Image: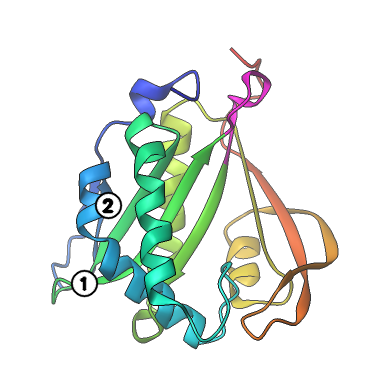
């Protein structure tokens, strides 16, 4: 099992909004992830079709993306990765985010925010910020003191991270291809969630 605080990191979390019309953010267990893998693949496909650089190229390969979600299940079960899904009032998944723990002994104090995705028709309502805050809060509760992430330079996600208090660490040119296969720069960010400490 990865991480020194895996017990706390693996507990179930559910965030309900006061307004039932707003999405409910739920942490997925490994079985829950597998049950939702096709919906999550639909979410990724929607983002890729909209031009979001999240690791996949256009046109999106739905079968391959579904298999990618399936491949996360063992690490979710082991506590190395946490996945949250936001369900709208109609029950469909409209957003997701991941928190990935450092795997080596000297990196147990840090984690990576990854695959923060919101459906195009659910954007502009604060859901991305709510998902990010959920992952940050659970990271701090599980003993993670440092968070890192990367995002395509100039993207709407970059503006979100800056406004949420993340600090730019630098930009790497030609780091990853966009959905059309063109190499683009990526900006690295970090955020401290607790006091500086050791790696135990």
- Most distant residue in the top direction: 200
Name the one closer to the observer, 109 or 28: 28
Circle 1 Cα neighbour tier, 10 Å, few/some/many (<14 / 14–19 / ≥20): some
Q: Residue furthest right?
A: 173
| Residue 134 appears in the rendering | no
Residue that numbered label 1 is attached to: 88
Q: Residue at x 45, y 63 (%)?
A: 129
- Total marks in image: 2
Which region of the structure is painted magenta? Answer: 102-111
Q: Say which residue label 2 marks.
A: 33
Q: Judge left or right: residue 21 versus residue 71.
A: left
Residue 70 image position (x, y, % from top left): 35, 53
Measured in 3D between alpha carbons, the distance from the residue under mark 1 to the one under mark 2, in whole angstroms, is 17 Å
152 or 30, which lies in front? Answer: 30
Identity of the residue drawn at 37% across and 30% down: 78
Q: Secondary structure at mark 2?
A: helix
Is residue 68 positioned above or below 79 on the image?
below
């Amino acid at each position: 099992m990865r991480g020194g605080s895996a017990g706390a990191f693996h507990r179930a979390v559910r965030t309900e909004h006061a307004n039932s019309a707003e999405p409910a953010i739920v942490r997925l267990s490994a079985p829950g992830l597998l049950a939702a893998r096709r919906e999550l693949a639909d979410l990724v496909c929607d983002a890729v079709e909209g031009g979001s650089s999240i690791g996949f190229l256009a046109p999106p390969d739905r079968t391959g993306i579904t298999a990618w979600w399936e491949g996360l299940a063992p690490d979710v079960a082991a506590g190395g990765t946490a996945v949250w899904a936001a369900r709208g009032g109609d029950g469909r998944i409209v957003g997701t985010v991941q928190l990935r723990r450092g795997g080596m002994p000297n990196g147990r104090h840090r984690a990576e925010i990854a695959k923060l995705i919101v459906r195009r028709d659910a954007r502009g309502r604060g859901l991305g910020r709510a998902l990010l805050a959920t992952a940050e809060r659970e990271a701090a509760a599980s003993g993670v003191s440092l968070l890192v992430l990367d995002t395509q330079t100039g993207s709407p996600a970059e503006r979100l991270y800056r406004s949420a208090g993340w600090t730019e660490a630098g930009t790497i040119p030609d780091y990853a291809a966009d959905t059309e296969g063109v190499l683009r720069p990526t900006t690295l960010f970090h955020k401290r969630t607790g006091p500086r400490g050791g790696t135990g």
